[in-house]
Structures are given as structure tokens and as C-alpha cells.
């Protein structure tokens, strides 16, 4: 099944002229994009010190190897049969690549059930590889054979006596480009609705993850990580083009927050956000909301699906990032004299 991509970008860019403001808005829209940014920079008092709102200063957005490409979000059905899940994921990746996808994203915990009882049973020793990590080995091999970039959702990882919820990112050569261990563990208690504590079995990761790939600079989070806007802001300040969040929001928070958080992270940081969830299984102990989605840098939903198994194929055009940042030049309007985002990891490395 293929979910059709839908875009509202053209509507968002269309001029909306109203009453007495119409003349001013029309003349503003005719300015060159860089002219708009220059106006914003000149209008902001130097005492605002926008360049100091990020410490260290924000990096320039790098030129990506590809400015336009197809993304695939594989919303997979997940069973208790690990071998079946691995073969099923591979087939979905291959089908997405055949449809022209250069970047493929898998869901959170796709190789087995999402439960504290299952995490130890389905965990893999990624560093050992081979038979100790069949999910990892499949992803590496298929990325190499298809020459695609693969954000491998997440699987339980066993390392040094600990268990982690881990996302592996593979380059088109099949090599591991980065590994993100879920930083913010999903410990939630909504009386009468849902209680789940990942910390009963999992250990929190200790490092944000930004990876340079053949399809641009990608910041990685896993599910609950999306709730923490500081992480997304940090990734934007490191020059990310795209944030990827494999996730499995539930039937309580999914309807309320899943799309809201994606659009907020995209609009706040003026970049692309892609999420990929497992398909819904109402017989499972943990029921996922689904609704894998791609959001553009204006907060517009470019493509999404419902809760059934599906693969979304949608186009990413990075030129929209600079365009949107010219329309709303937030980087020149921040108040470094009043607040600051500190990237502790980058500061420590200097």
C-alpha cells in the first residue's frame, strides 16, 4: 500500500492580502529573499545580540549533497516473530528504494513487541554484529546493496550490561554513520489511561546525534525525545536540514500531541521533520497511534498516513529551508541579550 503525499506549500506561499495591510504586504513580498533578511538584520537593534542566543554560535546550514530527493517512511506491522519482522522490514525497504527513495526511515522498536518484557529478549549486541545482531546486519547489508541512506528506526541494544533503545543510521555504503540511544526515557503515568516506564529496563543515552549523510545533515531523536524542544533547537544550531524521529506514540497522547509536536519542532526551527511509527495492532499490549508524517519548514504537513501498514513516499526540497528562513528571519531576531541555548557537548569539545 502506498500513501499519497499531500502538500500545502503552494497555499502557504500564496499572498493573502487584507484591508489596509495589503499594500505593505504586497510590496514586501516583491523584495528578493536576501533583501528581506537584510531588512530584518538592519531593523534589529545591535543590543539584541541575536548571534549570542546560541552558545557556541549556530553553524551555517551546510550545502547538502542532494537538495531534492525522495524520502520513504515505512510504517510496518510488528509481530512477536523476530525473523518475520526482519524479512518484512527488508522487503519494505527494497520496495521503497524501487520507488526511488534515497532515504528510508523505519519505526521505533520494529523487530519485536514494544514492552519491558520483550526488550531483553529482542535486544542485539550491535558492536558484535553478525549473528548477535541480525536486525543490524540486515540494515547494513540492504543499505549497501540498494545504495540508500537508512535511518533504521530503533531496536533494543545490549551493551556493557545495559539495554538501550537505539537508532542506527547507515550510509549508502552500508557503514554505520551514527548511533542514537534514546536520551529521554518514556516514563509516563496518566491515571486511567496509560502507565509505562522504560526506565524499568532501559538506560538513557548520553549524547545528541547529528549525522552527515548523502541526503544532508540529519538530527536523530526517538519518540519521547520529540517532546524536548531544546534537543531540536540544538540540532538546528548544529546545521541540521532534517530531524528524524522514529516513534510509537500511544492511543492517549497520539491524537493530542503527535502531529502537534512534529509541526512545532519543524516551525520553531525552520527545517524538515520526519516521523515513522509502527502500524497499529489493537491486540498488542502497547497500541501505537501510527500516522507517520513528513512536515516542512513552515510547519506544513507534506505527507502523512493513517494507522494501517503503509509506506509514504514524499519529496524533500531543501531549498525551502532557506526560503522559509528568509520569509521569517528568526535568526536575526533572537534576543541573545535575554536568553541563550547552550550546547554543552560542543562547548566541551572546543
Image (cartoon, helix red, strand yellow):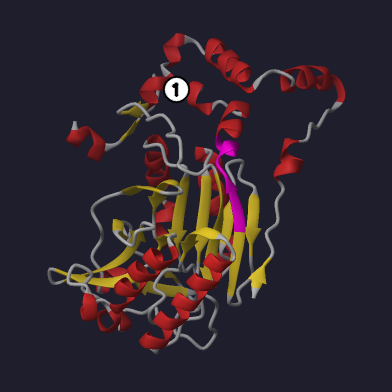
Q: Quadrant of residue 43?
A: top right
What is the tally of numbered marks visible in this picture?
Answer: 1
Estimate the x, y position of residue 69 in percent, counting from the top left.
56, 51
User: Splitting the image into 4 quarters, where does residue 136 fall?
Assistant: bottom left
Residue named by callout 1: 335
- Identified at 39% across, 65% down, the residue is 143
Residue 320 falls within the magenta-colored stretch: yes
Residue 83 position, x and y percent, is 37, 87
Question: Which residue is nearer to you in this view: 4 or 243?
Answer: 4
In-front residue for pair 152/69: 69
Q: Answer whether residue 152 is visible to the viewer in this image.
A: no
User: Residue 309 colored magenta?
Assistant: no
Residue 249 position in % (x across, y down)? 49, 67
Specify start and end residues of the magenta stretch as a single range: 314-321
Which image quadrant: the N terminus? Answer: bottom right
Q: Is residue 346 left or right of residue 33?
A: left
- Write the residue at 43% across / 20% down: 50
Amino acid at each position: 500500500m502506498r500513501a499519497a503525499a499531500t502538500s500545502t506549500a503552494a497555499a502557504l506561499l500564496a499572498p493573502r492580502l487584507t484591508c489596509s495591510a495589503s499594500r505593505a504586504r504586497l510590496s514586501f513580498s516583491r523584495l528578493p529573499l536576501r533583501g528581506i533578511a537584510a531588512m530584518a538584520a538592519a531593523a534589529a537593534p545591535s543590543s539584541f545580540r541575536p548571534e549570542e542566543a546560541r552558545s557556541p554560535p549556530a553553524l551555517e546550514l551546510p550545502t547538502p549533497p542532494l537538495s531534492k530527493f525522495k524520502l520513504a517512511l515505512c510504517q510496518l506491522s510488528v509481530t512477536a516473530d523476530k525473523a518475520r519482522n526482519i524479512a518484512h522490514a527488508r522487503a519494505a525497504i527494497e520496495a521503497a528504494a524501487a520507488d526511488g527513495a534515497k532515504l528510508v526511515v523505519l519505526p521505533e522498536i520494529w523487530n519485536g513487541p514494544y514492552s519491558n518484557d520483550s526488550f531483553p529478549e529482542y535486544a542485539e549486541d550491535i558492536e558484535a554484529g553478525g549473528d548477535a545482531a541480525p536486525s543490524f546486519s540486515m540494515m547494513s547489508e540492504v543499505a549497501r546493496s540498494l545504495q540508500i541512506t537508512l535511518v533504521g528506526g530503533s531496536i533494543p541494544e545490549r551493551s556493557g550490561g545495559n539495554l538501550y533503545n537505539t537508532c542506527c543510521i547507515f550510509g549508502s555504503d552500508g557503514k554505520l554513520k551514527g548511533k542514537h540511544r534514546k536520551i529521554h526515557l518514556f516514563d509516563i503515568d496518566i491515571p486511567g489511561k496509560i502507565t509505562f516506564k522504560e526506565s524499568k529496563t532501559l538506560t538513557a543515552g548520553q549524547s545528541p546525534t547529528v549525522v552527515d549523510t548523502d541526503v544532508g545533515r540529519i538530527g536523530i531523536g526517538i519518540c519521547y525525545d520529540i517532546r524536548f524542544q531544546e534537543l531540536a533547537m540544538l540540532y538546528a544550531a548544529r546545521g541540521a536540514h532534517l530531524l528524524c524521529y522514529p516513534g510509537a506514540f500511544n492511543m492517549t497522547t497520539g491524537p493530542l500531541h503527535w502531529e502537534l509536536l512534529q509541526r512545532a519542532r519543524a516551525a520553531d526551527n525552520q527545517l524538515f521533520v520526519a516521523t515513522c511509527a509502527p502500524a497499529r495492532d489493537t491486540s498488542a499490549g502497547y497500541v501505537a497511534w501510527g500516522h507517520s508524517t513528513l512536515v516542512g519548514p513552515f510547519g506544513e504537513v507534506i505527507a502523512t498516513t493513517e494507522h494501517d501498514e503503509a509506506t509514504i513516499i514524499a519529496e524533500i526540497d531543501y531549498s525551502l529551508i532557506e526560503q522559509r528562513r528568509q520569509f521569517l528571519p528568526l535568526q536575526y531576531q533572537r534576543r541573545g541579550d535575554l536568553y541563550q541555548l547552550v550546547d554543552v557537548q560542543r562547548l566541551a569539545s572546543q
